[in-house]
Amino acid sequence: MVMIEVTGLTYYYPLSHTPALKEINLQIEAGQFVAVIGANGAGKSTLCLVLSGLIPTLFNGRMLGNVTINSMNTRNHTPGEFAGRVGLVLQNPTNQISEMRYTVFEEVAFGLENLGVSPSEMPERIEHVLRLTGLIDLRDRSPFTLSGGQRQRLALASMLVLDPPVLVLDEPTAMLDPQGSREVFHIIQTLTTKNTTVVITEHNLEWIAQTADRVIALNKGSIVLDGNPEFVLTSPLLETFGIDYLRYTQAARESQIYGLWPSQTPLPVTLEQSVLGFNRVSSIKKGGG
Amino acid sequence: MTLGLYTAGDSWLHRLFPITKLIFSLSAIAIIFGGPNKWLSAILPGVISILILWSAGIAWRALKLIVQLLTPIAVILFIVHGFFGPANHQILMRLGPFVLGQEGLMYASLIVVRLVSTLASSLLLVTSTHPGSLIQALEQTGLSRKLVYLLGSPLLLLPQMARRIQTIRSAQQSRGLETQGNLLQRIKALFPLVAPLVFSALVDVEERSLALEVRGFSAPTPKTNLTEIPDTTKQQVLRWGMIVIAVCFLVFEFWRKRNGYD
Amino acid sequence: MRICAENIHFTYPGNVKVLDNISVTLNPGEKVALIGANGSGKTTFARHLNGLLRPQSGTVWVGDWKTSEHSPAQLAQRVAYVFQNPDEQLFRQRVWDEVAFGPQNLGYSASQVENMVEQALSLMGLTNEANFNPRDLNYSGRKRVSLASALAMQTPVLIFDEPTASLDMKEKKQFSKVLKTLNLENKTTLIISHDMDFVVENVDRIILMYEGKMIHDTSTKHFFKDKELIENSGLVIPQLIRLSQELNHLDLALNVEQFIKERERIITTIKTE
């Protein structure tokens, strides 16, 4: 089942003459885990806003083409109507906490209250996501006293409690330390086992290589590469789009020139693949003398 | 834990329905500035507020804040009105070329007393009520959530603002900006401190509004509440009582003035 | 210029000990990274080095100055410090003027300021954006303006707090070049960063902090020998180091070039066996 369908999308921000996104055609299946990569200014964040239904209705820019999310055309529905159907997690955890509530528990309830969920149904749903995000012991704390990583998990919990079939994440770990990032990655990974459709922009390519079903590379507002992580992250074109290779890939790419990487083996995107490849060269050399 | 001015606690005052405290503060302020008998109207609400704060065990913090905030203002008022008050007639003291007048001194005292009372009755609300509870209570009264957020968000963002001001000051000092020193230097330092505060707040507002949208802030559904902050009939009666008293005072004073009793 | 911190202790009000007996010397021409989890005390320590914080006991020397005897604004002549979030410092209408703010504060003449600004803009690749309003640039653009603002001050010591956060590949490469230029000018640079892949390729020495203590201070090459220590401090081991370790390299590679050299060495030994 197609969850998100984008046809002929071009988008201009207000007052801008260069499109932020250009002629995008895209279909995302339900339950797919899609990573979007690209240099700064390539249009990643704009795509996130489009795929969460906030563009075009919340912004005054000009949009050509059509976007449907879960069979709802984003031109005909307000962000209010998409709430609960699409979740969005942004970079800065602090800005995603409403601060309108006293405790972590109540903060998570805020979205449910807005969507008119009955109060008797709330505690069970909230406890479930607090457990999922490892925040259950902090349920009575003030969100104001949490660390950055904990706050970002709270922002995630506040989205997940609405149980959206689509979750869009725009660089959710950009402001976190390695420990905080690991915790957030871990939670997102558990979503892949459910049927949630996930779209994420993220700088950590190693994690993307391990987790994503599909990687889309953007350059100057257009989709330039689209495929599985092995295909996109090893593409010889990646460099020209201002996107870094994984160090594993880069090491193998340059080793190839010196015959230090087996010629028939595709370039690696994980540690395991690299180790296998490099050891094969050693054993060939050993065997061949 | 302190969030802005809020001091955590479990006194009877803390447990009151926030709207009751809000109505108290508003009625008190109305009487302070518009009640009959200027002095009594100015003093009484302040005294009552401080007594209430004292019984809730948070009077010291409030008094400290009042002194800190009002001392400089009081000094200026006494000097300006005491020495230069236009109504000065009765001379109390001469200081070189300056003359201290009784009328000006009394006028300054009245303003200071009014300010103390106003602050005391507002602190009664602010120090004993978590901003979150006040907001939730306002929502419970049926006000639109957007209006409540608009009213409440400055209060909520205060601690974050305070932290940010500190960071901006450090960042600009690291670029050689002298923030201490004479008045001129301090005024010159103001713009590099205020402009980033405004700009970063604007950047945040955009992200905040997106985050609120995806959490259904403007969803076209009726809203519910996880918990209701408890209100009682007694408090309802009390609130109406306070409103009636304040209105009576104002009307009486209005009638007195119109009939030329002043 | 040399920076020398001697037995620094620092406790925030409310008895949270943040720095516990820290002693560090940073020498001219050194590129140093300060790493550790959030809350380990990195920022608190770094803010002692330009006088934003003063040690409660111990001394910090910046050249022949004690930080306790100078204001942060004075110390700005010797130490530049770039904060993480550019939006918490940019305030002028033109990139050029923004970058000029530091040198102007330090009392340089108009022609000197012009020179310093032009140099810093060209180092950060912002020459074409000189007349832009910083607010019209995207986040990484604003970040580069804040970096240029510090470079323009031409101080002998520079401290960067998460300089590569939100920069993309090209922008990181550019910043890496800037660090090399500073190094050639014999300047002391300290980078606070979580970006380990960037750190290993760009610094000579790494200082690791954990719960207010300095638990490791050594050359980048030696740093990763103690795998357990790094993992226990909540850090990520850079990809090339992990790969070298898995392949049992004797020489842990800090960059691809070193990695290839080691591969070649291994293959030749195999052949000769």
Image (cartoon, coloured by chain):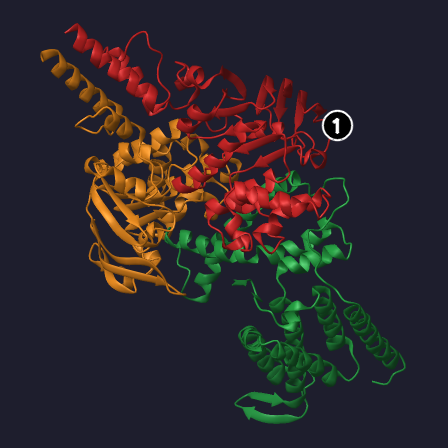
Q: Residue A70, percent across and down?
A: 68, 25
Q: Colour of chain A?
A: red
Q: Residue B99, percent across and down?
A: 59, 89
Q: Is residue A177 visible?
A: no
Q: Which chain shows up in green?
A: B
Q: Nearer the viewer, residue B99 or B21?
A: B21
Q: Residue A208, percent across and down?
A: 44, 26
| Apparent side of residue C76 relative to residue A139 in the rendered image (left or right) | left
Q: Residues within 10 Å of mark 1 (few under 14, many from 20)?
A: few
Q: Which chain shows up in orange?
A: C
**Which amino acid does the dot numbered 1 rest on?**
Asn
- For image coordinates 31% across by 34% down, the residue present is C237
- For image coordinates 27% across by 31% down, the residue present is C201
In the image, residue C41 above or below residue A131? below
Q: Quadrant of residue B66?
A: bottom right
Q: Quadrant of the N terminus of chain A?
A: top right
Q: Is residue C162 visible?
A: yes
